[in-house]
Amino acid sequence: MEYARLTPSPDLADVVEHYWVAVAPDPPGEVRAVLIPNGRSTVQFCLATAGYRCAAGASRAEINADVFLPATEKPYVITQRGASHYVGVQFTPTGARALWLQAPAVPELVRSVARTEPTKQSLASDPKVALDEWLRSESRRARSGRSERQGRALAASAAAMIDADPPAVSVSELASALGVSPATLYRAFVRWVGVSPKAYASIRRFFAFTSGLLHRVGGDTQAMLAAARGYADESHAAREFRRHTGVSPTEFRDRLDGIALLMFGPSESE
């Protein structure tokens, strides 16, 4: 499988972290991957054979094509048969709802969320240009009042502080540092990010741990990684890992990390 991360136009940096492209030929059998939570909403378009997506604990799989996926605490298991070609957007923590104030808390088809969609031809030809043009168009149509902008600014500041060091700050300390009550912070965060500040901190701590697991250098151990990322011990890290992925760290690294490599990988193209 070929992966690429594309940098959006600077004028979209407030709402988009990066674009991504994943392309693979027809596999000999079914391919499975774990899409782990990272505290970000995403959009993905399918340009080839559509796979299926199943949320942890769900009994029914959904077609994984042309879909908006909100931030979530639970992983998705992705299955794919046939050649794949996906183009996606990873938003900033508050970016999706800056574009679409009523963005849903559950997965929905892009056409149910956005006002327009890029064409498949444009996405295949030049995904960066197609996505830049699409999101600029969506941004021009977005409207928010002063109180909404203040709420978004509060949530964005809190998310940035958590991202800087996920284990370091409690929700009450975070609220105090931002000069608001915990209840005010909670409401703004859930409204604009889609999960609570506490859940977000847990997600980001786990995301940092997973990134270290996939990119560790010789000599690092899971115990060292756990300590570095703020977990009490290796068993605590393993429990959190299974909660967020449904598998053990070893299984994830050795068999189910295809999508994760895209999420964490250094590959980038302009």
Image (cartoon, helix red, strand yellow):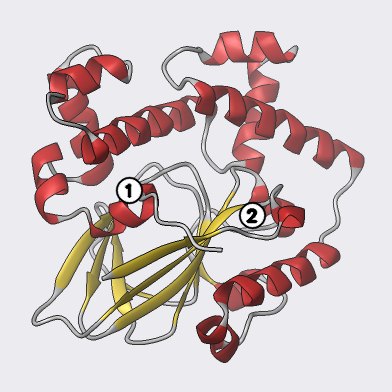
Q: Is residue 264 toward the left or the right of residue 134 in the image?
A: left
Quadrant occupied by the C terminus: bottom right
Taking the spot 54% from the left edge, 16% from the top edge, the residue there is 171
Taking the spot 26% from the left edge, 68% from the top edge, the residue there is 60
Q: Is residue 34 toward the left or the right of residue 119 in the image?
A: left
Where residue 30 sits in the image (x, y, percent)? 13, 76
Disc 2 packing (10 Å; few <14; some 14–19; many ≥20): many
Q: Is there any visible trace of residue 101 in the rendered image?
A: no
Where residue 148 sits in the image (x, y, percent)? 81, 41
Taking the spot 69% from the left edge, 50% from the top edge, the residue there is 13
- Badge 1 marks a residue whose secondary structure is loop
| 108 up-or-down from 216: above or below | below
Where residue 20 sits in the image (x, y, percent)? 47, 64
| 159 up-or-down from 53: above or below | above
Quadrant occupied by the N terminus: bottom left
- Find residue 78 and report its image quarter: bottom left
Specify the amino acid type for callout 1: Ile
The residue beneath circle 1 is 36
Q: Is residue 10 toward the left or the right of residue 245 in the image?
A: right
Q: CA distance from mark 2 to mark 1?
A: 18 Å
Give the residue at the far right of this rendering: 146
| 209 up-or-down from 94: above or below | above
Per the rendering, the mark at residue 96 is: 2
Taking the spot 72% from the left edge, 75% from the top edge, the residue there is 115
Disc 1 packing (10 Å; few <14; some 14–19; many ≥20): many
Specify the amino acid type for callout 2: Ala
- Badge 2 marks a residue whose secondary structure is helix
Closest to the observer, 57 or 214: 214
Per the rendering, the mark at residue 12 is: none
Q: Is residue 138 toward the left or the right of residue 128 in the image?
A: right
Closest to the observer, 114 or 168: 168
Q: Is there any visible trace of residue 238 in the rendered image?
A: yes
